[in-house]
Amino acid sequence: MKSHTRVLVIGGGVVGCSVLYHLAKAGWTDITLIERAELTAGSTWHAAGGFHTLNGDPNVAKLQQYTVELYREIEELSGQSCGLHLTGGVMLAGTKERMDWLKMAHAKGRYLGMHTEIISAAEAKKLMPLIDEKQFAGAMYDPLEGHLDPYGTTHAYAKSAKILGAEIVLRNRVVDMAQREDGSWDVVTEQGSIHAEHVVNCGGLWARECGRMVGLELPVLAMEHMYFLTEDMPEVAEINASTGKEVITALDFEGEIYMRQERGGMLLGTYEQACVPWSEKVTPWDFGQNLLDPDLDRIAPSLEVGFRHFPAFENAGIRRVINGPFTFAPDGNPLVGPIRGLRNYWVACGVMAGFSQGGGVGLALSNWMVHGDPGFDVWGMDVARYGDWTTLSHTNAKVRENYARRFRIRFPNEELPAARPFRTTPVYDRLESRNAVFGDMNGLEHALWFAPSKAEARDEFSFRRANDFPHVAAECAAVREGVGLLEISNFAKYEISGKGAEAWLDTILPNRLPARGRMVLTPMLNENGMLIGDFTLAREADDRFMIFGSGLAEQYHMRWFQAHLPEAGVTLRAHGLDLVGLQVAGPKSRELLARLVDADLSKETFPFMAVGRFNVGTVPALIGRVTYTGDLGYEIWVKSEHQRALFDLLMKEGAGLGIRLFGGRALNALRLEKSFGSWSREYRPIYTPWEAGLERFVSTQKSEFIGRDALLRARDEGPRRRLATFVVDALDADVIGDEPIWRDGKVVGWVTSGGYAHHAKASVALGYVEAAAFDATAPYEIEIIGERRPARIAPEPLFDPKGLRMRG
Ligand SMILES: Cc1cc2nc3c(=O)[nH]c(=O)nc-3n(C[C@H](O)[C@H](O)[C@H](O)COP(=O)(O)OP(=O)(O)OC[C@H]3O[C@@H](n4cnc5c(N)ncnc54)[C@H](O)[C@@H]3O)c2cc1C
């Protein structure tokens, strides 16, 4: 083993080997992988080896497609077979809702260039003769499905990496590591120490333990998982003989089972409801290539359904049962990327589908390390979507919930119940007693809408408009006609102060900084000129600023801020829940606030985008004259100990003005009719400000800011796509996001978000259209639950296009 390496990858599972290969391919060849035992010795060796491209997040789906297409490349380079069986596969729907879900997955796949097909149950039977077609409503066929040899594939990655110059050291555990001042690592292994510029944690089943070596508690947990292999089956032999092919893979959502052919029999696995975590707190280092005790009783309910749906299994003998552990993050997607505040420490773990995702994970991480950017939209698997707020037991509850729901439908209005409420603000009880239906954002409860009674305060899950519809409509009307109150504590709030604050913000943000007592909207860009943030920036004093942004992205933004912070002169603080907020919006909001604030709030003295400190009644507050509703309104920020008093004051004083609580769903409806985009939907690192319609918030006159050169290049080249607001001729369902946009029989774009804009009385979709296909007068179609609905571009916002209300 050498004494110095540019990158040290911990772990020789499929993920570590893929990371190693992709780094070597990108030209970083002074790299070392250290494996505790043998390659595949974690969860990789006993995997069923299935792969597919389907994923709820289309960006992750795209990386899965990349993974499947990569296998030929590593086979050719290494000379090592991956044992590929690209059989194609069917995903079988037993209910109408599941069929709707498949149609939507199929539609999403269209703009990703995937070639899935929606087929009838009879057609599915022809492709997969083992099914009883009477049990199914239909299916989706995906030609990019199949299975492979986990051992061969991992070795193909490893051999390819070695051919390109990488080193692999086996039977050598990493036991500890310490960081030097320059950010590099002294890594202690059983065979001695090695100095590494970067460390990548691909520890799989031991990823938590490898994280703990540097004081990090990663939100991952291993679950037991079972599949069995049958004896040879005559039905399988018959299919092989009559088609000349292997039986294709199948996924049965209602049975929560997957299957494929294995030699002359079948392999069948389940995601059972009675799921069991493994090694909940610590994974033992002496866990070898062992299997866990099988427990067929646990999977009996799934098998019962399976036998009904696939009758041939009833007579099949079981040859072998495999029960092994593998790891999950709380939402089931991988944890990839750099860790905030830990220089040169990277993770690629929680990869639950290593053979579908391992290639994409390796590519994204190597791009990130070598080029400073993953090169794709990896938000869905960025480790920064979790933060300090997770705990071991919260992760445990969420991972179990996710495992049991692996093959369940998640409706767009469905909030998952495990481990809730977990984080609450002081007004939570106030909102709950007024029949709030809550959503969960980063474990924080926030009101989605308010029901007329306790009994009605629950969502009826649906892909179509649901029971909240009239109540959200009433909340929107209250804002547009009078005054509404919304809790906004789930925004992120950062305070930046110090002598160097102004200069630093000027470098990291592309807009001009506001004057004292003023605010501006500003995106944030990476070096490639792509959108990595969308903020309101307020200036309280010459050397003191506040940034308000997406609460979802707090870790993501803090990671960026901290990585770009100068050594001295700037103090940065994320306020979290020590600063909480309420917003009042609507034409009567000024009147309400004026009754409580002993200061002149007129348009002349406290105009649109003004910010200042006031007492609201007894409560000291920071008030900004801005709201995301696009109406007259104010964001009021207070210390958490004052939030209840502020809430009570506003509700009491507002009673005479007809104040009404509103929630996140109404806010969404209101911003849609203003064509306001939102972070992680319209604004993501795959779009430039020119494409996203944010050009008025970048100042190319400024001589220096991150991303400036790339931004100017992008301007000169012209946008590849453009964000547009569509009015859709919808029936009883609105867009959710990721639907394809059609023009002249071709897919020319995709929806980023949408819904029903109650005040404008229109079904609205925001989405990106290829620049050449953008024509505000052309007819478009947007595919909603398998049906193409006519749509047209709205040339200006549907509500208050001149912004008179907002500025009034
Ligand atoms: C029963 C079962 C069936 C499955 N079926 C499928 C399937 O069909 N398709 C699919 O895509 N996925 C499947 N999986 C999941 C798949 O196995 C995982 O996604 C994959 O193995 C994850 O790989 P990894 O490299 O992240 O982790 P691991 O395979 O656990 O690798 C981690 C490696 O790191 C090493 N290591 C850890 N700590 C240290 C240290 N301190 N020093 C040195 N080395 C260290 C370990 O020894 C290990 O080799 C299945 C899993 C199970 C259990």
Image (cartoon, rainbow, N blue to C red):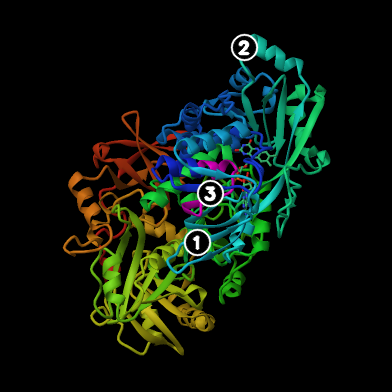
Along the viewing direction, whichever of 775 and 84 lies nearer the viewer: 84
Residue wearing tag 2 = 243
C-beta proximity under 8 Å, tags 3 and 2: no
- x 73%, y 49%: residue: 287
**Would residue 778 be found to the left or right of residue 477 on screen?**
left
Residue 172 position in % (x across, y down): 63, 50
Direction from residue 241 to residue 501 in the image, left or right: left
User: From the viewer's perspective, is 673 left or right of 471?
Assistant: left
Disc 1 crowd, CA 10 A, few/some/many (<14, 14-19, 20+): many
Calculate the distance from the C-alpha at mark 3 to the C-alpha at mark 2.
40 Å
Q: Secondary structure at mark 2?
A: helix
Q: Which residue is mark 1?
A: 185
Residue 300, quarter of the rendered image: top right
Residue marked by disc 3:
412
Amino acid at pointer 3:
Pro
Q: Which residues are magenta?
A: 1-18
Residue 217 vs 541, above or below: the answer is above
Image quarter (top left, top right, bottom left or bottom right) of the C terminus: bottom left
Other residues around mark 3 within 10 Å, as few (<14) / some (14–19) / many (≥20): few
Residue sticking out furthest to the top: 242
Q: Residue at x 31, y 29 (%)?
A: 744
